[in-house]
């Protein structure tokens, strides 16, 4: 896709030749610099103790009590109308509009609405919204509406209905790895043309897969839908869809939807682990520690294109490392509890307890970007094609880019981040506690069996807080 | 004149159309329809298109933002005054991700896809060095604002010019006379142990020697270091002035630990504002810097004796008396460097007018016209001050400021002569063929 002309090659050669002299240095001191002055080590200790204490306290609460609470839901509303297709069609039109803006609008990633909406509003913002308000993506996805329309118009019939079941979550796993790679490793994921191309092709591939495997592809094979659906399980708001009862909106305990009777298959387990490792690696790959490990100077960061190799390996290696640690903890736990269930079976039931950790870290890690890029997105919306329009009067709005700057901003941000990380882990411990003992007789032994996973979560709390407070490049 | 804090979005071609057209509309009385404007004099006033190689993402993003605001303010001012040779100026923004490889790709995109007249605005040295060969091969004038010595060193090519900001060698060299006669003759340098720090080490050590003073110790700090106390015992007791150029997120920790190490009994301290560019000096943790000195390319804080040109420039860019955005006092500008964008655009304008620029076939003529320049007078086009330009090494020389931290702000206490920073040229680009 990207040409590498001789001029560029020559440029690289000369760059290497001159890289050792005549540098300007402007590595930014601002936000993270102020965080470095805060007593973050105390937070790490306190966070670890909070998670450990939650585990110990919960040990005295019988899991069935937690499960009983988790099953409780207050129905807020029942709506007969199911507007899924209509909303999805509108979302599809919105996507087409954004893709056109990406292709024909400004090449500047902070002026073009496509990268701003895709990365800030959709990827950062909607993930958080899913975790709070449930699976809105079931409505907002740009495939269901067009698919139903297509089926109605053409009478399309999907042949092999059993094929999807055999695939498990493997296609979603592969898709999510590709997505994470594009976000974290590709040199220019913000480039509007490039992003429009990638998103457009992905939409087409998914649509084709839906025609081949049926609409359930979204639940199994499409990585964004699978991710959003998993995240939405922890939301205190639940939105159930049924042909007969219509749409039911109910209120429940946060994380209640993560306590499942039937565990995920191995591909689903790996999917959850990948989603957590991807967001964690995004933090890790910006730390000075990662640069030092790879013998790179963070103060003259050579740019993303120079670290594609090491970050590709890093992304995969971190996933393998986290998955190994998780399976090791589960396997130890199964032995300690004397459980009859296999490691994979237990892992399948417990892996969803990692979802609050992933969301907590997602919130903490991307909060700053959301606050600034969200403003740019709002502004870009008024002039989507850079023609001078001002549709909503926001085209020239001042962007408060320093919203998180300075000592006060850093203190506020750090506390929000630390709270999100610790809360995510505490919820994870609770979910794991409620989910582990299904069908167990010896309660205390089962609690003992949770210890390895709980300790892993304590360690991950410390790691998450360290990622957000370590010296790093912007 | 545009509001500097506006988001300065770009159009389909990347140009900040709203910004540019506001100016042109005022100057040429163009017909405007609500919400949409267009050129009415297209036949005679097709725009001059300048590709702005911007650090919109990557480690340079925070600095790139202020470079862009300054650029847009200059474009608006130039267009309000009739543009270049009566043609409006368009800025086409492309993000280089602060990545040298992408930088080269962006230059190529500017040439082949956007068909700009020239490229301008790069800040980070490694992006300049990575992009310059492409600019040379595509015969694309490349006006950089990076303060690196790479242009003057003669290692780049004839199409690369740095006329709007002085280079690190001149800046560092020009500090030695004042530092040695006012702060002390025995200096110790603390610097990050890589090219940027080495430039300071080498140029300052030589410049002090030329003044009959001495750098008695050099303390290199590994770039990934985040705690510094264990390095401080390497500073000799007889040190009269401590010269520091630490950069990166750990700078605040460096200052704090230095304060803890010395308490109230410290040597004189001199640094480069690069360390704390865009950081509020009144921040907690920086109290130790009170009474210490900094180099500033252009004063961040409005000085009582600021010229009308400087005040007009600050107004146009949209910074308040503290050098912060008028819309957000927390948003501290990169005042010491960003003026270079403003001044460079005016030099491009002057060079294009001198060369009677008609189109891309005249690009070499613009370079020649720039090389023929010798001096830029202080005024609205050069609010930082008068400059001398050496066409052989494509580099300007100017006054530098030495400021003292007083009450959490910087007050200029000395302004160097242009000659203080001049050095023997080591190259001659004018002998290279186009």
Image: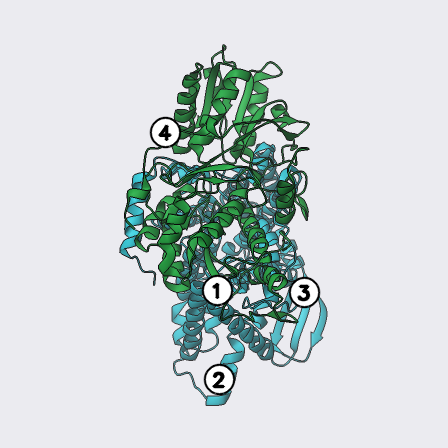
Chain colours: A cyan, B green
What is the tally of numbered marks visible in this picture? 4
Residue B356 seen in the figure? yes
Disc 4 and disc 2 in contact, CB within 8 angstroms: no
Q: Residue at x 51, y 43 (%)?
A: B340
Name the chain under label 4: B
User: Quick one: SS at disc 1?
Assistant: loop
Q: Which is closer to the viewer, label 1 or label 2?
A: 1
Task: Identify the residue under disc 3.
Answer: A393
Vertical comparison of B232 with A320: above or below? above
**Residue A356 percent coordinates (x, y):** 57, 53
Q: Quadrant of residue B75?
A: bottom right
Count neighbours of disc 3 (C-alpha within 10 A) and say few if under 14, some if 14 to 19, many if 20 or more.
few
Name the residue that disc number 2 marks: A150
SS of the residue under disc 3? loop
Question: How many C-alpha atoms fall within 10 Å of the one at disc 4: few (<14), some, or many (≥20)?
Answer: few
Confirm whether circles 4 and 2 share one chain: no
Please give the residue where the numbered disc 4 appears in the rendered image. Answer: B424
User: Within 10 Å of the Cα at label 1, are there few (<14), some (14-19), or many (20+) other Cα atoms?
Assistant: many
Q: Which residue is mark 1?
A: B13
- Tell which circle, 1 or 4, labels the residue nearer the N-terminal end: 1
Judging from the image, mark 1 belongs to the subunit labelled B
Residue closer to the observer: B99 or A242: B99
Q: Are marks 3 and 1 on the same chain?
A: no
């Amino acid at each position: 896709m990207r040409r590498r002309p001789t001029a560029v090659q020559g440029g690289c050669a000369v760059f290497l030749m001159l890289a050792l002299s005549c540098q300007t240095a402007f590595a930014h001191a601002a936000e993270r610099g102020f965080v470095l002055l805060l007593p973050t080590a105390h937070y790490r200790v306190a966070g670890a103790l909070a998670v450990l204490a939650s585990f110990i306290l919960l040990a005295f609460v019988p899991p069935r009590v937690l499960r009983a609470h988790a099953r409780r839901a207050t129905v807020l509303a029942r709506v007969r109308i199911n507007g899924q297709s209509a909303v999805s069609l509108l979302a599809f039109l919105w996507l087409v509009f954004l893709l056109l803006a990406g292709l024909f609008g400004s090449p500047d990633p902070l002026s073009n609405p496509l990268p701003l909406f895709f990365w800030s509003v959709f990827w950062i913002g909607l993930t958080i919204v899913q975790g709070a308000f449930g699976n809105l993506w079931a409505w907002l996805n740009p495939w269901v509406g067009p698919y139903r329309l297509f089926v109605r118009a053409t009478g399309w019939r999907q042949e092999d209905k059993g094929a999807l079941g055999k695939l498990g979550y493997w296609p979603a796993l592969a898709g999510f790895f590709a997505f994470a790679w594009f976000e974290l490793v590709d040199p220019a994921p913000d480039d509007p043309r490039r992003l429009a191309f990638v998103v457009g092709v992905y939409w087409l591939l998914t649509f084709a897969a839906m025609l081949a495997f049926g609409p359930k592809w979204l639940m199994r094979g499409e990585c964004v839908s699978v991710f959003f659906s998993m995240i939405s399980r922890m939301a205190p708001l639940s939105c159930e869809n049924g042909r007969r009862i219509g749409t039911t909106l109910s209120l429940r305990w946060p994380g209640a939807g993560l306590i499942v009777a039937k565990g995920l298959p191995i591909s689903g387990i790996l999917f959850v682990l990948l989603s957590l490792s991807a967001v964690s690696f995004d933090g890790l790959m910006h730390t000075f520690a990662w640069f030092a490990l790879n013998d790179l100077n963070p103060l003259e960061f050579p740019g993303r294109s120079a670290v594609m190799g090491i970050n590709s390996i890093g992304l995969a290696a971190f996933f393998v490392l986290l998955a190994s640690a998780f399976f090791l903890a589960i396997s130890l736990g199964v032995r300690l509890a004397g459980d009859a269930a296999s490691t994979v079976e237990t892992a399948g039931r417990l892996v969803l307890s990692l979802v609050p950790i992933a969301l907590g870290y997602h919130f903490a890690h991307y909060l700053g970007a959301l606050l600034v890029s969200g403003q740019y997105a709002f502004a870009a919306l008024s002039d989507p094609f850079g023609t001078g329009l001002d549709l909503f009067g926001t085209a020239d709005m001042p962007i408060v880019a320093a919203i998180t700057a300075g000592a006060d901003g850093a203190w506020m941000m750090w506390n929000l981040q630390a709270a999100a990380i610790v809360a995510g882990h505490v919820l994870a411990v609770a979910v794991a506690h409620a989910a582990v003992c299904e069908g167990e007789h010896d309660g205390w032994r089962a609690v003992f069996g949770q210890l390895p996973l709980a300790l892993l979560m304590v360690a991950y709390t410390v790691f998450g807080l360290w990622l957000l407070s370590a010296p790093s490049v912007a | 004149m545009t509001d500097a804090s506006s988001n300065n979005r770009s159009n389909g071609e990347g140009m900040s159309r709203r910004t540019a057209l506001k100016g042109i509309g005022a100057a040429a009385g163009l017909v405007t329809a609500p919400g949409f404007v267009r050129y009415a004099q297209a036949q005679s006033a097709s725009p001059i298109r300048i590709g702005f190689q911007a650090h919109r993402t990557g480690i340079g993003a925070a600095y790139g933002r202020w470079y862009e605001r300054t650029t847009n303010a200059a474009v608006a001012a130039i267009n309000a005054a009739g543009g270049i040779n009566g043609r409006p100026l368009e800025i086409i923004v492309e993000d280089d991700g602060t990545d040298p490889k992408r930088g080269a790709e962006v230059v190529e995109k500017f040439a082949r896809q956007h068909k700009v007249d020239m490229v301008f605005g790069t800040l980070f040295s490694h992006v300049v060095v990575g992009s310059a060969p492409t600019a040379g091969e595509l015969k694309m004038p490349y006006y950089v604002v990076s303060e690196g010595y790479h242009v003057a060193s003669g290692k780049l090519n004839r199409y690369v010019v740095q006329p709007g900001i002085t280079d690190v060698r001149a800046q560092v060299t020009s500090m030695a006379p004042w530092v040695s006669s006012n702060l002390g003759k025995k200096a110790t340098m603390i610097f990050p142990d890589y090219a940027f720090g080495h430039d300071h080490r080498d140029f300052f050590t030589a410049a002090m020697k030329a003044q009959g003073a001495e750098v008695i110790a050099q303390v290199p700090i590994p770039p990934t270091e985040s705690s510094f106390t264990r390095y401080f015992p390497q500073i000799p007791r007889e040190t009269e002035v401590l010269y520091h150029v630490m950069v990166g997120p750990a700078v605040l920790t460096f200052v704090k630990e230095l304060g803890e190490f010395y308490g109230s009994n410290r040597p004189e301290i001199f640094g480069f504002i690069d360390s704390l560019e865009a950081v509020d000096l009144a921040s907690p943790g920086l109290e130790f810097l009170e009474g210490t000195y900094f180099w500033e390319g252009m004063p961040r804080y409005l000085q009582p004796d600021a010229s009308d040109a400087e005040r007009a420039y600050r107004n146009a860019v949209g910074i308040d008396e503290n050098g912060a955005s008028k819309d957000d006092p927390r948003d501290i500008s990169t005042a010491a460097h960003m003026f270079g964008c403003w001044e460079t655009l005016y030099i491009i304008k002057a060079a294009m007018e001198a060369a009677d620029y008609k189109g891309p076939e005249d690009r070499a003529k613009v370079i020649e016209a720039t090389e023929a320049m010798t001096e830029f007078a202080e005024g609205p086009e050069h609010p930082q001050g008068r400059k001398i330009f050496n066409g052989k090494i494509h580099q300007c020389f100017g006054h530098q400021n030495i400021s003292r931290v007083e009450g959490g702000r910087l007050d200029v206490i000395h302004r160097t002569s242009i000659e203080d920073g001049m050095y023997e040229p080591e190259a001659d680009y004018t002998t290279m063929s186009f």
